[in-house]
Amino acid sequence: SASSWFKAGHVSTRPIEVIPSPIVVGSRFDLRLAGPRGGWQPTGSTNARELKLLLDPEGSVTGNDCFTRSQDVRAITGHYCFSATDCKTPSASSEEGLVWENVKVHFAGMYAVCYCDLHCDRAE
């Protein structure tokens, strides 16, 4: 459900850092969500630990948008989604955060980093 998703930077319980910053358009990089003692799920099955990048030129993407919208396959490569709530699992994970390797952003602009740790496909 939308309550399981959040837009990085809009979480008030613990700070989460998106690394690298800034992201360079057209270059491959390892995307890391870092938050020491963030309560990350170190392992998970399908529809757990989901991440997607949504174009967000107005800075208005909501948790509901994160739940319902699909990642644009033209804008992001190296990190893919099978559906709006089922995306490539992290390449590495620990209690310090998660890493997705070889991501590439093709268009400049603002993006919402949407992440869900558990029960990401539930529409309740």
Image (cartoon, rainbow, N blue to C red):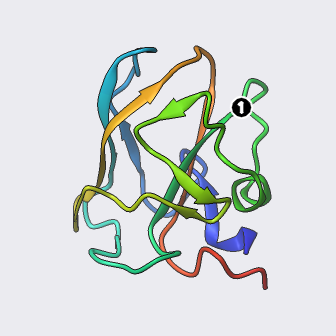
Q: Is residue 115 above or below residue 57?
A: below
Left or right placement of residue 4 versus residue 67 in this view: left
Question: Which kind of residue does numbered mark 1 sit on?
Answer: Asp
**Rendered view: 43 above or below 54:** below
Q: Where is residue 1? Give x, y as percent.
A: 73, 75
Is residue 47 or residue 1 the one in the foreground? 47
State which quadrant residue 81 falls in: bottom right
11 to the left or right of 55: left
- Residue at the disc numbered 1: 56
x, y (%) of residue 51?
50, 55
| Total numbered badges shown on the rendered structure | 1
Q: What's the residue at 74%, 24% (across, down)?
A: 57
Question: Dot 1: within a 10 Å radius of its alpha carbon, few (fewer than 14), some, or many (20 or more) residues?
Answer: some
Vertical comparison of 69 with 22: above or below:
below
| Left or right: where 59 falls relative to 105 | right
Q: Residue 117's spot in the image, x, y percent?
A: 48, 71
Residue at 40 percent across and 80 percent down: it is 45
108 and 39: which is toward the camera: 108
Residue visible at 22% across and 68% down in the picture: 95
Which percent across, then down, holds residue 20? 32, 29
Quarter of the view holding residue 73: top right
Query: Looking at this rendering, what residue extends furthest in the bottom direction?
Result: 124
